Image (cartoon, helix red, strand yellow):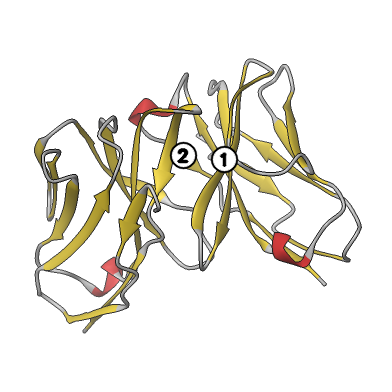
Amino acid sequence: QKEVEQDPGPLSVPEGAIVSLNCTYSNSAFQYFMWYRQYSRKGPELLMYTYSSGNKEDGRFTAQVDKSSKYISLFIRDSQPSDSATYLCAMSGISNTGNQFYFGTGTSLTVIP
Amino acid sequence: KAGVTQTPRYLIKTRGQQVTLSCSPISGHRSVSWYQQTPGQGLQFLFEYFSETQRNKGNFPGRFSGRQFSNSRSEMNVSTLELGDSALYLCASSLLSATYGYTFGSGTRLTVV
């Protein structure tokens, strides 16, 4: 079983829609949760960072962490064509090989004008 | 300030050859991590270097190795290349640890033929 599971999509939505992206994980030691956005031919860029459970909002983006369910989400409000990218969840904690990050495989999002 | 710089951007090698990839982190960042990104597996952690010492290592064979220099620049070497090594290799830097996230480079696209 993979440490982190993420639906690869692809996801296609009209401009202005609310987008929900999700990841599940199996390691209860994970405490740091992040979302990265990756445009084609670019490296991932950090979008949101959350420590432990709870919500965090930044502009049109909201990250949620539910540690009891081992489930994290990223919501994008009023989606724009410029949001079209692959979104990767990442998480970290102490594992059997020390503190390292585990990534989901990414969800491809297309926002149609 | 300059971001994470990876060279070369693209590389084509033959099976059995070896390859060296280079990464210059953001100025002042002392931690450099390497990831392999493939469509099926997503980002997989190779290793992390901090102050010229390997601090953490993923589950890759010994053909994958790395090092870090006193100026924090890092190199990654893959010996005896296999077709399955074809991937995007990403370097990521952080100040001390990746607890608050990485800054990624644009990657080196390696194709093994």
Circle 1 residues within 10 Å: few <14, some 14–19, many ≥20: many
Out of B79 and B99, give the one closest to the viewer.
B79
Spatial CA span between label 1 and label 2: 7 Å
Position of residue A110 measured from the top left corner of the image (x, y, whole percent): 29, 77
In terms of secondary structure, where does tag 2 sit? Answer: strand
Residue identifier under label 2: B103
Report the chain holding disc 2: B
For residue A79, which quarter of the picture? bottom left
At 40% from the left edge and 52% from the top edge, which residue is drawn? A2
Out of B106 and B64, give the one closest to the viewer.
B64
At 10% from the left edge and 74% from the top edge, which residue is drawn? A17
For residue A94, which quarter of the picture? top left
Type of the residue with mark 1: Val
Type of the residue with mark 2: Thr
Instruction: Name the quadrant of the C terminus of chain B.
Output: bottom right
Q: Relative to residue B93, is residue A94 drawn left or right?
A: left
Position of residue A34 measured from the top left corner of the image (x, y, whole percent): 29, 42
Instruction: Determine if marks 1 and 2 fall on one subunit.
Output: yes
C-beta proximity under 8 Å, tags 1 and 2: yes
As drawn, B102 above or below A26:
above
The label number, if any, that marks residue B4 in the structure image: 1
In terms of secondary structure, where does tag 1 sit? Answer: loop
Out of A23 and B100, give the one closest to the viewer.
A23
